[in-house]
Image (cartoon, grey):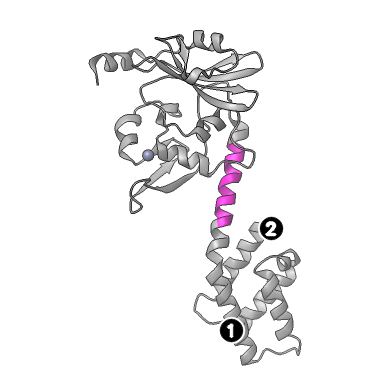
Amino acid sequence: MSDSDIQVALVKLCEQILADDELTSEEVYDLGQWLNDHPEARTAWPGDVLFPLLVQVYEDQKLTKTDLKRVTSKVRVVLRKAPALLARAHQQARKDVAAVAAAETNTSVARLPIVPISMDVTSFTNPAVHYHVELQTLSCSCLDWTKRRSRLPKHHIGRCCKHVMATYRRVAPPNGWPDWIGAFFAEGWTPDASVEWDVMVIGKGKALVSSLSSRGWADVYAKTSEGWERFGYNSNEDRWSRGHAPRHAKVIAGFVHSVRPSVFKRILRWLGA
Ligand SMILES: [Zn+2]
Protein backbone atom coordinates (compact mmCIF):
# COMPACT_ATOMS: atom_id res chain seq x y z
CA MET A 1 0.00 0.00 0.00
CA SER A 2 1.22 3.54 -0.76
CA ASP A 3 1.43 6.16 2.02
CA SER A 4 -1.78 7.68 0.79
CA ASP A 5 -3.56 4.28 0.67
CA ILE A 6 -2.57 3.51 4.26
CA GLN A 7 -3.83 6.93 5.43
CA VAL A 8 -7.14 6.39 3.65
CA ALA A 9 -7.44 2.86 5.14
CA LEU A 10 -6.99 4.27 8.67
CA VAL A 11 -9.54 7.04 8.07
CA LYS A 12 -12.02 4.40 6.81
CA LEU A 13 -11.41 2.33 9.97
CA CYS A 14 -12.08 5.45 12.10
CA GLU A 15 -15.33 6.04 10.18
CA GLN A 16 -16.35 2.44 10.73
CA ILE A 17 -15.71 2.34 14.49
CA LEU A 18 -17.35 5.72 15.08
CA ALA A 19 -20.36 4.98 12.86
CA ASP A 20 -22.67 4.81 15.91
CA ASP A 21 -21.03 7.97 17.30
CA GLU A 22 -19.36 6.26 20.27
CA LEU A 23 -16.39 3.99 20.80
CA THR A 24 -16.43 0.79 22.85
CA SER A 25 -13.29 -0.54 24.51
CA GLU A 26 -13.26 -3.37 21.90
CA GLU A 27 -13.25 -0.82 19.08
CA VAL A 28 -10.37 1.09 20.66
CA TYR A 29 -8.54 -2.23 21.05
CA ASP A 30 -9.17 -3.01 17.37
CA LEU A 31 -7.79 0.41 16.42
CA GLY A 32 -4.67 -0.25 18.51
CA GLN A 33 -4.30 -3.70 16.98
CA TRP A 34 -4.55 -2.26 13.44
CA LEU A 35 -1.84 0.29 14.24
CA ASN A 36 0.32 -2.51 15.69
CA ASP A 37 -0.09 -4.47 12.46
CA HIS A 38 0.64 -1.43 10.26
CA PRO A 39 3.74 0.32 11.65
CA GLU A 40 4.02 2.36 8.41
CA ALA A 41 0.71 4.07 9.30
CA ARG A 42 2.12 5.51 12.54
CA THR A 43 4.38 8.06 10.86
CA ALA A 44 1.69 9.81 8.79
CA TRP A 45 -1.52 11.56 9.76
CA PRO A 46 -3.79 10.39 11.35
CA GLY A 47 -1.68 7.47 12.66
CA ASP A 48 0.91 9.90 14.06
CA VAL A 49 -1.70 11.39 16.40
CA LEU A 50 -3.72 8.26 17.20
CA PHE A 51 -0.85 5.89 17.96
CA PRO A 52 0.87 8.04 20.69
CA LEU A 53 -2.53 8.54 22.36
CA LEU A 54 -3.22 4.79 22.38
CA VAL A 55 0.24 4.12 23.84
CA GLN A 56 -0.61 6.61 26.62
CA VAL A 57 -4.06 5.22 27.43
CA TYR A 58 -2.83 1.60 27.50
CA GLU A 59 0.22 2.44 29.62
CA ASP A 60 -1.44 1.21 32.83
CA GLN A 61 -2.89 -1.85 31.02
CA LYS A 62 -6.51 -0.77 31.47
CA LEU A 63 -8.86 1.49 29.60
CA THR A 64 -10.84 3.83 31.86
CA LYS A 65 -13.94 5.84 30.90
CA THR A 66 -11.76 8.97 30.68
CA ASP A 67 -9.38 7.16 28.32
CA LEU A 68 -12.32 6.10 26.17
CA LYS A 69 -13.57 9.71 26.01
CA ARG A 70 -10.12 10.99 25.04
CA VAL A 71 -9.79 8.47 22.20
CA THR A 72 -13.36 9.15 21.03
CA SER A 73 -12.80 12.90 20.83
CA LYS A 74 -9.48 12.41 18.98
CA VAL A 75 -11.17 10.11 16.42
CA ARG A 76 -13.90 12.76 15.97
CA VAL A 77 -11.23 15.39 15.24
CA VAL A 78 -9.60 13.01 12.72
CA LEU A 79 -12.92 12.53 10.92
CA ARG A 80 -13.56 16.28 10.79
CA LYS A 81 -10.23 16.77 9.00
CA ALA A 82 -10.54 13.63 6.83
CA PRO A 83 -12.41 15.06 3.80
CA ALA A 84 -9.34 17.05 2.69
CA LEU A 85 -7.17 13.91 2.85
CA LEU A 86 -9.77 11.81 0.99
CA ALA A 87 -10.09 14.48 -1.73
CA ARG A 88 -6.30 14.58 -2.16
CA ALA A 89 -6.12 10.78 -2.32
CA HIS A 90 -8.94 10.72 -4.89
CA GLN A 91 -7.19 13.34 -7.03
CA GLN A 92 -3.92 11.39 -6.80
CA ALA A 93 -5.71 8.20 -7.90
CA ARG A 94 -7.09 10.05 -10.95
CA LYS A 95 -3.62 11.30 -11.87
CA ASP A 96 -2.26 7.73 -11.59
CA VAL A 97 -4.97 6.53 -14.00
CA ALA A 98 -4.16 9.44 -16.35
CA ALA A 99 -0.42 8.58 -16.23
CA VAL A 100 -1.19 5.04 -17.47
CA ALA A 101 -3.39 6.46 -20.25
CA ALA A 102 -0.69 8.99 -21.24
CA ALA A 103 1.91 6.21 -21.50
CA GLU A 104 -0.40 4.19 -23.78
CA THR A 105 -1.30 7.13 -26.04
CA ASN A 106 -0.02 7.10 -29.62
CA THR A 107 0.69 10.73 -30.49
CA SER A 108 1.21 9.88 -34.19
CA VAL A 109 -2.55 9.81 -34.68
CA ALA A 110 -4.92 12.70 -34.04
CA ARG A 111 -6.76 11.15 -31.12
CA LEU A 112 -6.99 12.23 -27.51
CA PRO A 113 -6.05 9.85 -24.68
CA ILE A 114 -8.67 7.34 -23.54
CA VAL A 115 -8.89 7.84 -19.78
CA PRO A 116 -11.38 5.86 -17.67
CA ILE A 117 -12.28 8.88 -15.53
CA SER A 118 -15.59 10.67 -15.11
CA MET A 119 -16.27 13.72 -12.96
CA ASP A 120 -18.60 16.68 -12.55
CA VAL A 121 -17.31 20.07 -13.69
CA THR A 122 -18.74 23.36 -12.49
CA SER A 123 -20.00 25.70 -15.21
CA PHE A 124 -17.55 28.55 -15.92
CA THR A 125 -20.37 31.10 -15.95
CA ASN A 126 -22.80 29.76 -13.33
CA PRO A 127 -21.35 28.05 -10.22
CA ALA A 128 -24.73 26.48 -9.49
CA VAL A 129 -24.59 24.46 -12.74
CA HIS A 130 -22.54 21.28 -13.11
CA TYR A 131 -21.78 19.20 -16.19
CA HIS A 132 -20.92 15.52 -16.23
CA VAL A 133 -17.73 14.78 -18.18
CA GLU A 134 -16.47 11.33 -19.21
CA LEU A 135 -12.96 11.09 -20.62
CA GLN A 136 -13.45 7.44 -21.62
CA THR A 137 -15.88 8.53 -24.35
CA LEU A 138 -14.98 12.26 -24.52
CA SER A 139 -18.47 13.34 -23.59
CA CYS A 140 -20.08 16.15 -21.62
CA SER A 141 -23.65 17.02 -20.67
CA CYS A 142 -23.33 20.71 -21.72
CA LEU A 143 -25.31 22.21 -24.61
CA ASP A 144 -22.25 22.87 -26.80
CA TRP A 145 -21.31 19.17 -26.60
CA THR A 146 -24.79 17.70 -27.06
CA LYS A 147 -25.66 20.04 -29.94
CA ARG A 148 -22.42 20.25 -31.88
CA ARG A 149 -20.01 17.53 -30.80
CA SER A 150 -21.95 14.41 -29.80
CA ARG A 151 -22.13 12.92 -33.32
CA LEU A 152 -18.40 13.11 -34.03
CA PRO A 153 -16.55 9.76 -33.95
CA LYS A 154 -15.29 8.48 -30.61
CA HIS A 155 -12.06 10.23 -29.50
CA HIS A 156 -12.33 12.83 -32.27
CA ILE A 157 -10.59 16.02 -31.15
CA GLY A 158 -13.73 18.02 -31.98
CA ARG A 159 -15.55 16.24 -29.12
CA CYS A 160 -13.47 18.35 -26.75
CA CYS A 161 -15.74 21.06 -25.31
CA LYS A 162 -14.26 23.45 -22.75
CA HIS A 163 -15.36 21.18 -19.86
CA VAL A 164 -13.72 18.08 -21.39
CA MET A 165 -10.59 20.16 -21.90
CA ALA A 166 -10.65 21.44 -18.30
CA THR A 167 -11.02 17.86 -17.04
CA TYR A 168 -7.97 16.68 -19.02
CA ARG A 169 -6.03 19.60 -17.53
CA ARG A 170 -7.20 18.81 -14.02
CA VAL A 171 -6.13 15.15 -14.10
CA ALA A 172 -2.88 15.76 -16.02
CA PRO A 173 -0.28 13.13 -15.04
CA PRO A 174 2.80 14.29 -13.07
CA ASN A 175 4.94 14.43 -16.24
CA GLY A 176 2.18 16.16 -18.22
CA TRP A 177 0.37 14.99 -21.35
CA PRO A 178 2.77 13.92 -24.12
CA ASP A 179 3.79 15.89 -27.24
CA TRP A 180 1.11 18.04 -28.94
CA ILE A 181 -1.54 16.80 -26.48
CA GLY A 182 0.10 18.77 -23.65
CA ALA A 183 0.10 21.99 -25.72
CA PHE A 184 -3.45 21.39 -26.93
CA PHE A 185 -4.77 21.23 -23.35
CA ALA A 186 -2.46 23.90 -21.95
CA GLU A 187 -3.37 26.48 -24.62
CA GLY A 188 -7.01 25.74 -23.90
CA TRP A 189 -8.51 26.75 -27.27
CA THR A 190 -11.77 24.88 -27.63
CA PRO A 191 -11.55 23.23 -31.07
CA ASP A 192 -13.98 24.10 -33.85
CA ALA A 193 -16.31 21.07 -34.10
CA SER A 194 -16.46 21.32 -37.90
CA VAL A 195 -12.77 20.81 -38.68
CA GLU A 196 -10.73 17.62 -39.09
CA TRP A 197 -7.35 16.95 -37.54
CA ASP A 198 -4.28 15.02 -38.59
CA VAL A 199 -0.79 14.47 -37.23
CA MET A 200 2.11 15.20 -39.54
CA VAL A 201 5.39 13.43 -38.84
CA ILE A 202 8.43 15.55 -39.77
CA GLY A 203 11.68 13.68 -39.17
CA LYS A 204 11.67 12.91 -35.47
CA GLY A 205 9.11 15.64 -34.81
CA LYS A 206 5.35 15.86 -35.10
CA ALA A 207 2.71 18.53 -35.61
CA LEU A 208 -1.02 18.40 -35.03
CA VAL A 209 -2.74 20.18 -37.91
CA SER A 210 -6.41 21.07 -38.43
CA SER A 211 -8.23 21.42 -41.73
CA LEU A 212 -9.00 24.98 -42.82
CA SER A 213 -11.87 26.82 -41.16
CA SER A 214 -14.45 28.60 -43.31
CA ARG A 215 -12.27 31.74 -42.97
CA GLY A 216 -9.15 29.96 -44.19
CA TRP A 217 -7.40 29.42 -40.87
CA ALA A 218 -5.74 26.20 -39.71
CA ASP A 219 -4.67 25.47 -36.13
CA VAL A 220 -1.22 23.96 -35.76
CA TYR A 221 0.38 22.57 -32.63
CA ALA A 222 4.11 22.17 -33.22
CA LYS A 223 7.38 22.22 -31.33
CA THR A 224 9.84 25.10 -31.27
CA SER A 225 13.13 25.38 -29.37
CA GLU A 226 11.02 26.69 -26.46
CA GLY A 227 8.67 23.69 -26.43
CA TRP A 228 5.21 22.93 -27.86
CA GLU A 229 3.09 25.86 -29.03
CA ARG A 230 -0.12 26.69 -30.87
CA PHE A 231 0.18 28.45 -34.24
CA GLY A 232 -2.38 29.82 -36.70
CA TYR A 233 -1.87 29.59 -40.47
CA ASN A 234 -4.02 31.49 -42.96
CA SER A 235 -4.16 29.70 -46.29
CA ASN A 236 -5.92 32.52 -48.20
CA GLU A 237 -3.14 34.98 -47.34
CA ASP A 238 -0.34 32.39 -46.98
CA ARG A 239 0.75 33.82 -43.63
CA TRP A 240 1.24 32.78 -40.03
CA SER A 241 -0.67 34.58 -37.30
CA ARG A 242 1.39 37.46 -35.80
CA GLY A 243 4.22 36.43 -38.15
CA HIS A 244 4.99 33.62 -35.70
CA ALA A 245 5.78 30.38 -37.55
CA PRO A 246 6.85 26.95 -36.31
CA ARG A 247 9.93 25.05 -37.45
CA HIS A 248 9.33 23.42 -40.88
CA ALA A 249 6.68 26.14 -41.52
CA LYS A 250 6.61 25.62 -45.31
CA VAL A 251 6.18 21.84 -45.11
CA ILE A 252 3.42 22.24 -42.52
CA ALA A 253 1.65 24.92 -44.62
CA GLY A 254 1.66 22.47 -47.55
CA PHE A 255 0.28 19.70 -45.36
CA VAL A 256 -2.65 21.86 -44.20
CA HIS A 257 -4.39 21.35 -47.58
CA SER A 258 -4.29 17.57 -47.24
CA VAL A 259 -6.34 17.68 -44.02
CA ARG A 260 -9.89 17.68 -45.30
CA PRO A 261 -13.21 17.73 -43.49
CA SER A 262 -15.47 14.82 -44.40
CA VAL A 263 -17.73 15.26 -47.45
CA PHE A 264 -20.72 15.28 -45.07
CA LYS A 265 -19.25 18.21 -43.12
CA ARG A 266 -18.36 20.06 -46.32
CA ILE A 267 -21.96 19.75 -47.51
CA LEU A 268 -23.21 20.99 -44.11
CA ARG A 269 -20.83 23.92 -44.30
CA TRP A 270 -21.94 24.67 -47.90
CA LEU A 271 -25.57 24.61 -46.73
CA GLY A 272 -24.58 26.97 -43.91
CA ALA A 273 -25.72 24.45 -41.26
ZN1 LIG B 1 -19.07 20.65 -21.96
For the N terminus, the image quarter is bottom right
Position above or below: 73 against 2: below
Is 151 placed left or right of 160 in the picture?
A: left
Q: Secondary structure at mark 1?
A: loop
Q: Secondary structure at mark 2?
A: helix
For the C terminus, the image quarter is top left
Task: Please name whichever residue, 134 or 213, is drawn nearer the observer in this view of the structure.
Answer: 213
Residue bearing the label numbered 2: 3
Q: Position of residue 149 (x, y in %)?
A: 35, 30
| Amino acid at circle 2 | Asp
Task: Please name whichever residue, 107 or 175, is drawn nearer the observer in this view of the structure.
Answer: 175
Q: How many marks?
A: 2
Q: Position of residue 105 (x, y in %)?
A: 58, 30
Q: Nearer the viewer, mark 2 or mark 1?
A: 2
Q: Residues within 10 Å of mark 2 (few under 14, many from 20)?
A: some
Name the dominant secondary structure of the magenta segment.
helix
- What residue range appears in magenta? 88-101
User: At x 65% / y 13%, what residue is drawn?
Assistant: 203
Task: Please name whichever residue, 269 or 214, is drawn nearer the observer in this view of the structure.
Answer: 214
Residue bearing the label numbered 1: 24
The numbered mark at residue 123 is none
Task: Please name whichever residue, 265 or 257, is drawn nearer the observer in this view of the structure.
Answer: 257
Q: Is residue 230 visible?
A: yes
- Sequence-earlier tag: 2 or 1: 2
User: At x 69% / y 58%, what residue is drawn?
Assistant: 3
Ligand 1 lies under 8 Å from the Cβ of mark 2:
no
Position above or below: 79 against 22: above
